[in-house]
Image: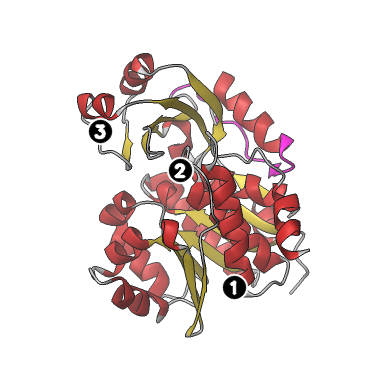
Amino acid sequence: MSQPSHDIVAIGNAIVDVIARADDGFIAQEGLAKGSMQLLFTTEEAEALYAKMGAGLEASGGSAANTVAGLAALGRKCGFIGQVAPDQLGAVFAHDIRAQGVSFTTEVRAEAEPPTARCLILVTPDGQRTMNTFLGASQFLPAAALDEALIADAAILYLEGYLWDPEEPRAAMRKAIAIARGAGRKVAFTLSDTFCISRHRADFVKLIEDGDIDILFANEAEITALTELDDFEAAVAKASASVPLLVVTRSEKGAIAIKDGARFAAPAEPIDTVVDTTGAGDLFAAGFLAGQAEGRSVEDSLTMGAICAAEIISHYGARPEADLKELVTKRFG
């Protein structure tokens, strides 16, 4: 097996985030489920909600894209595969992710409709984010668009559950798993949201039981939904029996990992004020995977994840504002 040229290559939704403040009254008025994610199925729906939002911050995003941006900020070599349209937001996304030092070779979709994906994120005063996602062009990522050489040359292929919903990228991710497996690489998967599990639980369980997932990321709600067990410890025990490395985030309670039956834990990093939880899980995954790429212990990798997550929730947006490498160096030297 050849030495990989990239640490991680991710496949996910290529989305531009639009983040704005909102109060609980606005969330209720629009009939949104606070703190969760819902899909907007038409351009018209997306434009209608956008028109009602207050002034916001616009930046390239998407769950897996946020993770590789964090990994790149930590000095790891990464790639990203995702579909954009030939429009202004598509150009913004491509420029931003390449500016982060991430390899982005996916060809721009030829058709202008649907347009590039966007996620309208409403942040309430308690820091909770309610995401309204229009998948646009990202949900038409075809298997033919995969950079097979890039996937085969990455130590870890990282997949986001959000992209499992549309049929075309689901087929692309199945092909990517086969490519990574054929090259002797590892596959990491994040469950993303209970919404995804409710729609595709059988698929996710089969991927795990078939041995296609080496590293599984989840939060408390997701792991209980996946296992259909209300008790957290029972859910962790069930899931960890079928995957080599299970990582579960627990918000202010920190995070745990189960590797080959051994349990590890790290506390959450102290923070004065939670401003915006957008991207917390994405950047936790970045810190953890960076730690693993550096050959650190599971416990230290959990701590790196907690450091990155704490930085993200201290400000608006899902991309780091502080120097993540410096924050990690202060802790570990």
Residue annotated with mark 2: 277
Please say whether residue 11 is visible from this viewpoint. no
154 in relation to 14, above or below: below
How far is mark 1 from mark 2, CA to CA?
A: 23 Å
Residue behind mark 1 = 299
Of 174 and 81, which appears nearest the observer? Answer: 81
Task: Name the foreground residue: 320 vs 7.
Answer: 320
Estimate the spatial distance between the alpha carbons at disc 3 and disc 1, rounded to whole Å. Answer: 37 Å
Give the mark toward the camera: 3 or 1. 1
Residue placed most toward the observer, 173 or 79: 79
Identify the residue at image location x=33%, y=76%. 233
* Quadrant assignment, res 86: top right
Point out the residue furthest to the top here. 51
**Main structural element of the magenta stretch: helix, strand or loop?**
loop
Q: Verify whether residue 108 appears in magenta.
A: yes
Q: Is residue 24 above or below residue 127?
A: above
15 is within the stretch colored magenta: no
The residue pinned by badge 3 equals 32
Residue at the (30%, 61%) spot, across then down: 201
Secondary element at image label 1: helix
Q: Please report the bounds of the magenta region as a residue range.
A: 99-113
Between disc 2 and disc 3, the foreground one is 2
Left or right of 256 in this view: 95: right
Q: Identity of the amino acid at label 3?
A: Leu
